[in-house]
Amino acid sequence: MSDTGRQSLTDKASNALKPDSEKSTTEHLGDKFKGTADSIASSLQPSSEKSTTQKVGDAVSGNSNAGTDRSMGQKVKDAVGLGDN
């Protein structure tokens, strides 16, 4: 099961397992779009709000927000001095 707005691990695996040579241009573009959208959704969602499955998927994919509880929005606020700290 995936979190709202996130690509399921099954979809990610099936996209990765099919050789690029067997994918149509539409499939290539779809994979790129879905991957980018999933990465953005992962970065915007705090780790504390992610399901265990999504935390594992993010850790495997190397998402930079995988080990933190702060959202990307909070990181931006912190960087410009508008954070809670």
Image: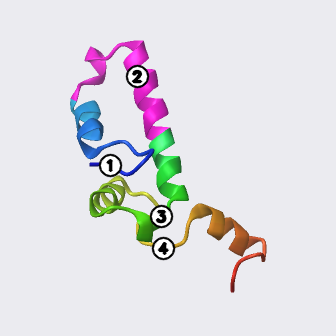
**Residue displayed at 40% across by 22% down:** 28
Type of amino acid under label 2: His
Q: Is residue 84 above or below residue 48?
A: below
Q: Earlier in the sequence, mark 1 or mark 2?
A: 1
Can you give x and y, in whole percent of width and height, for residue 2 in the image? 32, 49
Mark 3 to mark 1 CA distance (whole Å): 17 Å
Type of amino acid under label 3: Asn
| Residue on which disc 3 sits | 65
SS category of the residue bearing label 1 = loop
SS category of the residue bearing label 2 = helix
Type of amino acid under label 1: Ser
SS category of the residue bearing label 4 = loop
Q: Earlier in the sequence, mark 1 or mark 4?
A: 1
Residue 19 located left or right of residue 62: left
Mark 3 to mark 2 CA distance (whole Å): 26 Å
Majority secondary structure of the magenta segment?
A: helix
Q: Earlier in the sequence, mark 3 or mark 2?
A: 2
Q: How is the image coloured?
A: rainbow
Q: Is residue 13 above or below residue 55?
A: above
Label 2, residues with CA under 10 Å away: few <14, some 14-19, many ≥20:
some
- In front of the other: label 2 or label 4? 4
| Residue on which disc 4 sits | 69
- In front of the other: label 3 or label 1? 1
Q: Earlier in the sequence, mark 2 or mark 4?
A: 2
Q: Range of the magenta residues?
A: 18-36
- In front of the other: label 1 or label 2? 1
Mark 1 to mark 4 CA distance (whole Å): 18 Å
**Residue displayed at 77% across by 75% down:** 82
| Residue on which disc 1 sits | 2
User: Based on the displayed image, in which of its 4 quarters is residue 67 positioned?
Assistant: bottom left
Q: Earlier in the sequence, mark 3 or mark 1?
A: 1
